[in-house]
Image: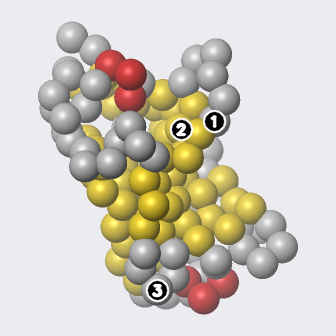
């Protein structure tokens, strides 16, 4: 059983920054992609940012230029999402994600609230 553990959510004001972290167990070679998704109340879960084993990244249109996905590779992989210039519409539960050969793995989610 692969368990992804997230941390770093919280309440911030518009324009502020926040950094999410996730521990993805095992070697990076176990996974085809890693990333972050989010789900706002009443909306479907959506991709925020993805990073692939050799380094390329993808971002959702609404976060490109404000959010950055990064990682530290070791016995486990530390996955990060740096979020700058946060907006109220970024409010959601953020989920860490890893895609294996046969399965998708999800974290438990961490709440990010952007409000004045």
Judged left or right of residue 23, residue 82 is left
Residue at image coords 45%, 46%:
60
Q: Which residue is mark 2?
A: 38
Residue at the farthest front position: 61
Marks 3 and 1 sit apart, C-alpha to C-alpha, by 26 Å
Judged left or right of residue 38, residue 71 is left
Q: Marks 3 and 2: which is nearer the front?
A: 3
Q: Which residue is mark 3?
A: 54
Q: Secondary structure at mark 1?
A: loop
Dot 2 and dot 1 residues touching (CB under 8 Å):
yes
Q: Secondary structure at mark 3?
A: loop
Residue at image coords 63%, 36%:
45
Residue at image coords 70%, 60%:
105
Q: Secondary structure at mark 2?
A: strand
Q: Position of residue 61 (x, y in %)?
A: 41, 43
Q: Earlier in the sequence, mark 2 or mark 1?
A: 2
Number of marks present in the image shown: 3
Q: Is residue 6 visible?
A: no
Quarter of the image with the N terminus is bottom right
Q: Nearer the viewer, residue 83 or 11?
A: 83
């Amino acid at each position: 059983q692969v368990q992804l553990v997230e941390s770093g959510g919280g309440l911030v004001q518009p324009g502020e920054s926040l950094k999410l972290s996730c521990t993805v167990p095992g070697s990076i070679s176990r996974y085809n992609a890693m990333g972050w998704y989010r789900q706002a109340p009443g909306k479907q879960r959506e991709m925020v940012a993805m990073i692939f084993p050799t380094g390329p990244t993808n971002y959702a249109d609404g976060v490109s230029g404000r959010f950055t996905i990064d990682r530290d590779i070791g016995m486990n992989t530390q996955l990060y999402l740096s979020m700058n210039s946060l907006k109220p519409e970024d409010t959601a539960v953020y989920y860490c994600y890893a895609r294996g050969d046969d399965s998708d793995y999800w974290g438990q989610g961490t709440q990010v609230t952007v409000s004045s």
